[in-house]
Amino acid sequence: MAISTGELVGDFTFLKPDGTPIELRAFLGKPLLLIFLRHLA
Amino acid sequence: MQRIYDDIKKLGGDVLVITFMSPAYLAMFLAERPQPFPVVADPERKAYDAFGIGSTSVTGFLRLGVIWHYLKLVFRGWLPKGPAKDADVWQLGGDFVIDASGKLRYAHPSQDAADRPSNEELLNSLREAH
């Protein structure tokens, strides 16, 4: 079930280009546009 | 994207770009094409799944709107490159706005490879997320 508008997104762990993890919450605190890409080419 | 990045910053917002490619491939990509905003990897696609981002199909690529989108890019000088080895060409993307408290305020999971919201729509959703 996908997250719906109005719901708390929760946290996710991503990987930086050097491979180290970073949490989504590190970017919160202001309105944030998340852009999920198709493949990089 | 870079064109509206300044407008987003002026609105007090920020951008996080997410790819499903590996961090190593992302690092190589950014070395060739540095970006002003952070780009991170979600190789297991846990966030892609949680945000309801699906995949397309051959018939999805053959929609008139998708073909026209790519033709316009070519007319503007874009030269298509093949996808990276092992890249999932069927994976779709999407655009989402989260407010400062972490609530989802706007969701646009792409319905096909050419489906993106307008810059104005994204900026409006960021304004409303304040």
Image (cartoon, coloured by chain):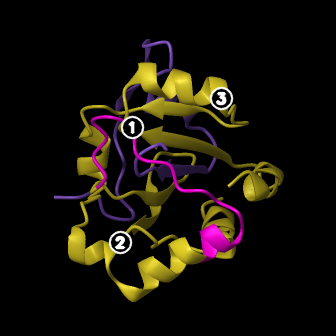
Chain colours: A purple, B yellow
Q: What type of secondary structure mainly makes up the magenta span?
A: loop
Look at the image and give the residue range highlighted in magenta: B72-89
Residue identifier under label 1: B84
Q: Which of B31 and B51 is in front in this view?
A: B31
Q: Which of B104 and B83 is in front in this view?
A: B83
Q: Quadrant of the N terminus of chain B?
A: bottom right
Left or right for A9, reference B26 = left
Q: Is residue B47 above or below residue B119?
A: above
Q: In this view, does B68 lie above or below B97?
A: below
| CA distance for labels 2 and 1 | 20 Å
Left or right for B85, reference B54 = right
The image shows residue B55 at horizontal and vertical percentages of: 24, 60
Residue identifier under label 3: B32
Q: Which amino acid does label 1 sit on?
A: Ala
In the rendered image, residue B91 lying in the magenta stretch gets the answer no
Q: Nearer the viewer, mark 2 or mark 1?
A: 1
| CA distance for labels 3 and 1 | 14 Å
The image shows residue B46 at horizontal and vertical percentages of: 25, 39
Residue identifier under label 2: B112
Chain identity of mark 2? B
The image shows residue B19 at horizontal and vertical percentages of: 43, 40
Q: Which amino acid does label 2 sit on?
A: Asp
